[in-house]
Image (cartoon, rainbow, N blue to C red):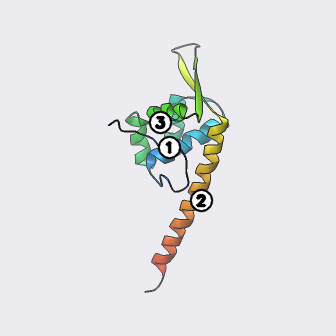
Amino acid sequence: MKRRCCITKFEVGYAGLQPSYILQGLILKLLSQKPLHGYEILTKIEERFPNIPAFRELVENGLGYRILRSLEAIGFITSEWEVSEGPARRVYKITEKGLEALNTFAKELDALKNAIDSFKNFLSEEV
């Protein structure tokens, strides 16, 4: 049985805080700002979140590129080869479906934040 590296849909409560799921949301957010090539996407994530070793490991192990291919396969992003000076690079763009997924991702993070706040409140209660 072939193992999947990524989820195939964004659904509230579906994947929780799995680093690969969060990485998908970060990729969609970056692409919602402008088209980027793969290395640029992964470098921006590493620069923005240097203290999260799980992201660095995912990127260093090549999972970032597998996530990009997965997001493209389910229609959240598209890509085209850009040929200019130097080697050709694949440039990724978010789709309308990807923007909807990003919105769902943000709602899911809000729900997770609320759940974590509830857990923290419970833990701080007097017994």
Contact (Cβ within 8 Å) of mark 1 with mark 2: no
Q: Dot 1 lies on which element? A: helix
Q: Which of label 3 and label 1 is nearer to you?
A: 3
Q: How many C-alpha atoms fall within 10 Å of the one at disc 1: few (<14), some, or many (≥20)?
A: many
Position of 83 relative to 38 (above/below): above
Is residue 40 toward the left or the right of residue 1 in the image?
A: right
Toward the viewer: 65 or 52?
Answer: 65
Contact (Cβ within 8 Å) of mark 3 with mark 1: yes
Q: Which residue is mark 2?
A: 110
Residue at point 35% right, 35% down?
2
Give coordinates of residue 52: x percent, y percent.
Answer: 44, 49
Label 3 – label 1 distance at C-alpha: 8 Å
Amino acid under label 3?
Answer: Ile
Residue at point 46% right, 31% down?
65
Give coordinates of residue 29: x percent, y percent.
Answer: 61, 42
Tag 1 or tag 3, which sits nearer the N-term? 1
Residue at point 57% right, 61% down?
111
Is residue 2 toward the left or the right of residue 67 in the image?
A: left
Q: Which residue is mark 1?
A: 23
In the rendered image, which quarter is residue 77 located in?
top right
Label 3 – label 2 distance at C-alpha: 23 Å
Label 1 – label 2 distance at C-alpha: 16 Å
Give coordinates of residue 73: x percent, y percent.
Answer: 52, 31
Q: How many C-alpha atoms fall within 10 Å of the one at disc 3: few (<14), some, or many (≥20)?
A: many
Q: Which quadrant of the rendered structure holds the N terminus?
A: top left
